[in-house]
Amino acid sequence: MKISTQTDAASAYFGERKAVELIAGAGFDAWDFSMFGMTGYDYKTKTFSETAHPLSGSNRLRFARELRHIGNECGIECNQSHAPFPSIMPQIRDWLLRAIECTAEAGGKICVIHPDNNGSPEQNAEMYNELLPFAKQCGVRIATENMWNWSRELGHSVFAACATPESFNAHLDAVIDDYLVACLDIGHAEMLGSDTCAVEMVEKLGPRLQALHIHDNDKLNDSHQLPFSMSIDFPPIINALKKVGYPGFFTLECDNYISSHRGERIAEDLRDMRSAAKRLAEMFENL
């Protein structure tokens, strides 16, 4: 079982080039390409715009290839990516196509693209069906992810697209294409109000599950913390992954662990993350 973590938090302090080097230096097998800087989204005007980020301009493919080269030189690969969001606005489609293209240039095989939180399976299928022909040309599978909304009144998460096994499978069924797969966010599945749990999600997604976002939380908030540091019970989840023959990487998305230290102990934080990921991988391998 290979282990990975996303570039997001480290790149916020040191840039993507250094982030790939640091992830390799910590002992990970792969890097998850965060593309959140590709576009700016104004929540007031609900519009997308270009940014000063290298992924936003005309040289984005060259930049993605450069990151791939850095990874190769360091002995690690890009296993997957995460496209910008939110997906609610049609204007994001062009940016999602760019994200898929950059994923391919970086060597990634899966691009995680959020569904519209409040969209039906049929509404989200329209977006995915529009993107899939290009994704196939690039040799990149699209992974949809289990989402959540927040109720201030209830004080916990409430239903959003793919939040339950029934909704997740309905989204996949609305498309029926091998190039649309599932990325299970374990932390999202374990939040109060999700009406499910990570074990149930794994069991009911079965072979459709091809990617993971792994992090810990207090079973209430989307904490994105280091595995084994909070309240999620990981052994039953690893058992379920083993039973369904999960074939992908163990990819951490616990960037708040780095952010909580403001990048001041980045190498140590990444080694801590590597140790947690390796512990999960060894649990899987020993079953």
Image (tube, helix red, strand yellow):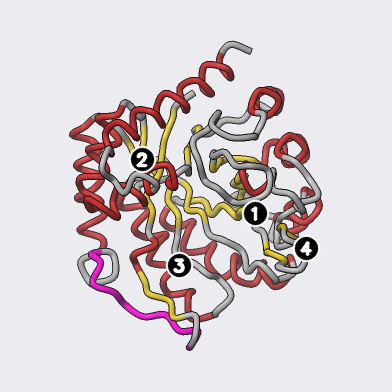
Contact check, label 3 and label 4, Cβ < 8 Å: no
* Number of numbered discs visible in the structure rendering: 4
Residue at 64% across, 54% down? 177
Contact check, label 1 and label 4, Cβ < 8 Å: no
* Residue 203 horizontal side relative to residue 106, left or right: right
What's the distance in space between the residues labelled 1 and 4, CA to CA?
A: 37 Å
* Residue 61 horizontal side relative to residue 273, left or right: left
Q: Secondary structure at mark 1?
A: loop
What's the distance in space between the residues labelled 3 and 2, CA to CA?
A: 19 Å
Q: Position of residue 276 (x, y in %)?
A: 47, 26
To which residue does mark 4 refer?
Answer: 154
To which residue does mark 2 refer?
Answer: 31
Q: Position of residue 108 (x, y in %)?
A: 39, 46
Going from N to C along the chain, the mark reached first, 3 or 2, is: 2
> Height in image: 167 above or below 24?
below
> Height in image: 84 above or below 8?
below
- The range drawn in magenta is 45-54
Contact check, label 3 and label 1, Cβ < 8 Å: no
Mark 1 surroundings within 10 Å by alpha-carbon count, few (fewer than 14), some (14 through 19), many (20 or more) = few
To which residue does mark 3 refer?
Answer: 96
Q: Secondary structure at mark 2?
A: strand
- Comparing labels 3 and 2, the label whose residue is closer to the camera: 2
Residue at 42% across, 46% down? 255
- Comparing labels 3 and 1, the label whose residue is closer to the camera: 3
Question: Disc 1 residue type?
Answer: Asp
Question: Disc 4 residue type?
Answer: Leu
